[in-house]
Each structure stands twice: as C-alpha cells, then as structure tokens.
Image (tube, rainbow, N blue to C red):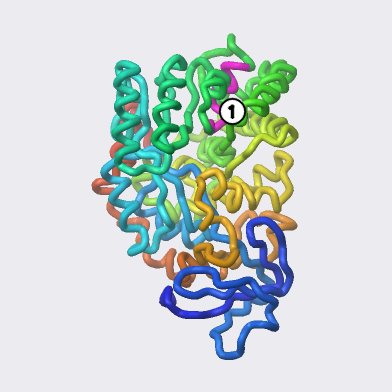
Amino acid sequence: MSSATDIYAVSAPRLFDGQQTFFDHAVLVQDGRVLEIVPRESVPDTLTHHHEIGCTILPGLIDTHVHFMRWAGPQYLAFGVTTVRDTGNDLNWILERRAEWEKRPWPRILSLGPLIDGPTAAHPFVGISCNTLEDAVSAVRNICERGVDGIKCYVGVPSEWFSLIVDTAHTAGQKVSIHCSKAGVLPAARAGVDEFYHLDGVLANVWPDHPPGWLNLWGLSNFSKTYDRQQEVADIISGSGITATPTLAYWDSQSRIRTPASLGPDDLRCTPKAMRNWQYEHPDPAASDQWRRALEAAQRFVSLLIERNVPILAGSDIPCGLVPPGMSLWRELQLLVEAGTSPTQALRTATSDAADYLERPELGRLSPGTSADIVVVKGNPMEEIPSRPDIIKTIRTGVIYQPKDLLAETNWADFSLKDEPWADQFEQHWKNRGSPKPE
C-alpha cells in the first residue's frame, strides 16, 4: 500500500476514463487526486511509474445497491469497487461506518439510511415502521437531517404516500429510491420517485392477476404472455424519467444457491460461515431452473428499457446470494451486456452514469481533479466483461492496494458478525423459515 501523498503515474495499453478510451496513456496522481491524463511517453522520468502490460485502466467502480457489512469491505476493493451505496441499514451504524471508511481497507460508503416501510417493517433491524403518512414524512425529514445520501422506501409504503414523501425528500435535496409496492412501479414513477430496484413492481403492472409470489414468478411460462403489456410499461417508464437499477446479479444468485455445484470454492471461501448458513437453500433443481428463467425474462425486460434509453445503474444487492462482494458487480455488468448493452456502456453504468445519478462529479471518471479511484485489470473489458476479473491493483483516493493483500487480511472462517445489523436480520429470517441445515 502506498501513501496517498505520493506523486506517481499509472499507465497501460488502454485507459477508459468513464466516457471514452485512450490508448497507451497514463494517469498522473497526487494527493489522492487525478492530476492529468497524458500519453505514456510524456510521463516525466523522475516519477514513480507503474506500467501495467496487457491491462486496462478504469475509474474505480461504483456498486449502487449493497447492504454493507464490515467483512465485505476489503473484498470490494480487491475487485475494483471503490465506492458503494448502502441501500438500507441501521442509521446510526451505517453513518458510523461511512465516517470511518478512509481509515479502513474499504470502499467509500454512501448511505440511504434505513428502509422506510409501512406499518409492519419487513426488515425491522434495518427498517422503520410507519403507521401513517405523517410518520413517513417525519422519518424522511429526520433521516435527511442526519446527512444521508438519499432516501429508500420499501414494499409496505402505500402508493398514495409517494408524492408527499418525494416532495419532502426533494425539498431536502435528496433523491428517492424504492423497492416497489403492491401497486407497482408506475405509481412511483408518476409520483416522481427517482429510481426503482430489482424491476420489482413491474410484475404488478404487467400481470395484475399473477399468482402469489415474488420475482421468481417471472420464470413461469404464463409470464411470456404479458410481452405486449411489458412494452407498454417500458414506454411509460421511459417517459417518466425514472432510473432502473435491476440488480440482475440477485436473480442469478437465487438460481445458483439452489444448485450448490454452481458455487465455486472461491465463492464460499469469501463468505463467513454464518452467512453461508443463513442463506443456504436445499438443492432444488426445479426452483433453480425457475429462477434462471426469471432472470432471462428480466433481461428481456431490461432490453426493452435499453432500447428506450431508460437510465440504468449497476447494483448487485450484496450480501444476497453468496456471491463474493465486488465480484458480484462484474457479474452484474456481464448480465447487462447479455441484456443488450455494449461492454463499454455496461462499464459506464458502474462509473460515470452512476456518478452522474449520485451527483458526485469527483467519482466515476478519470480527469483532472477527480478522486484518484482507479482499477487496473488484465485484458480489455471494453471488448468483453470478464467473468472473474484479474485485478492487478486497486487505487482508492490515491492509495494503492494489492488484491491478494486485501483478501489475505480477512479470515472468513473466524470473522465476527457481532453488532452487524444485517447479521441480526439474516438470523431472524433464518429462524423464521425453519432453519434449514447445510448439507
């Protein structure tokens, strides 16, 4: 690890600055900021110069949908994720973590605070129950006053509350994201909600008489009959200006955890034992296949959004599904490419597009004055997103980290989950579903 005050250069055959690609260029870094992008031959001989053969330089990646846990911090950096946005956590706990990220081998942390929910919070350890609209508005004001980076509403918030919640948050200078409602995504879009997650809510609008269930219902054969309506809903979404963060990696993970053979040893090694136990699912080929079909249906819907230029961000919903943090975002980018984006556009969803949505111009780009958040990866991800990226180094605010050191710092088997709000939440879910035992 280097000091953030060192002056140095990093060069490679390819450099993607968040918008366009340069060949045989270097990034000059000083005091945690990008000084300049210059041709490699222009780098002064007096500077420390890291030239990475066969590699590509990228801006530090941004995962816009995580639920932060401390064990995951070094892994994000190891896979090139230098900023995460926490989309639901205990408010005091996550603000403490946000205040200390620079002192830890973690990514930068942004926070939406706790989940604002209806009268019965689905996730009580990380959410707030609101019995009335007045309760919800008060919660939004209080959370905004704590200096969060946005507001998130959860499934129990009635659609008739949306407009006033949005107005309250926007008045405080914060955007509103939503994990749908029973009424679907369209009422949220009409009310001015800024972003929706998981494609949740689409089902209610395209298939109002669907059977009971959640996102796995997209894998039912009858769902394909809604395709004409899906196009209509995509048109409405496009006209509303709402941003989609589909978290396709979540759908993929739900298929994988029901087929244990699909989980490699590295996946399991990078997850604490308790997390593996809490998320364990008995092998269920039929359910795994249905989730796989649901993913394919979700990708077809995302392709409709892409065709209509709906803004899309990359988020992975870690720690769900036993996918290693950081690796999960690369999987999300792969799935977006399968849905119809180019590899370069997929990279933008996790760099410049994410920074623009978050209104953080110092992130997601490599240009003079931006934060020196840099990823050096083997190969050319602008041609093909790698399934298991070979990260040579990650630089966060000018400090150079070696992935092998980051992964070695954490002892997955013995890592304590004490005082982790999401550990308490997973424990409750595990007990509520009957505590299945891993085989």
Q: Residue furthest front?
A: 171
Q: Position of residue 373 (x, y in %)?
A: 51, 63
State yes or no: residue 198 in magenta: yes
Q: Quadrant of residue 108?
A: bottom left
Q: Is residue 191 above or below residue 412?
A: above
Depth order, front residue of 91/28: 28
Identify the image quadrant of the C terminus. top left
What range of the chain is rendered magenta?
195-205
Q: Secondary structure at mark 1?
A: helix
State yes or no: residue 2 in magenta: no
Q: Quadrant of residue 141?
A: top left
Q: Is residue 233 above or below residue 392?
A: above
Q: Is residue 105 visible?
A: yes
Position of residue 97 in the picture relative to residue 20 (left or right): left
Query: Which residue is depicted at the point 71% across and 42% down?
Result: 338
Q: Position of residue 358 (x, y in %)?
A: 51, 45
Q: Is residue 292 above or below residue 71?
A: above
Amino acid found under the numbered disc labelled 1: Ala
Q: Position of residue 310 (x, y in %)?
A: 66, 34
Q: Is residue 389 above or below residue 316?
A: below
Depth order, front residue of 181/371: 371
Query: Which residue is depicted at the point 28% across and 45% down?
Result: 93
Which residue carries the number 1 mark? 286
Q: Position of residue 116 (x, y in %)?
A: 36, 28
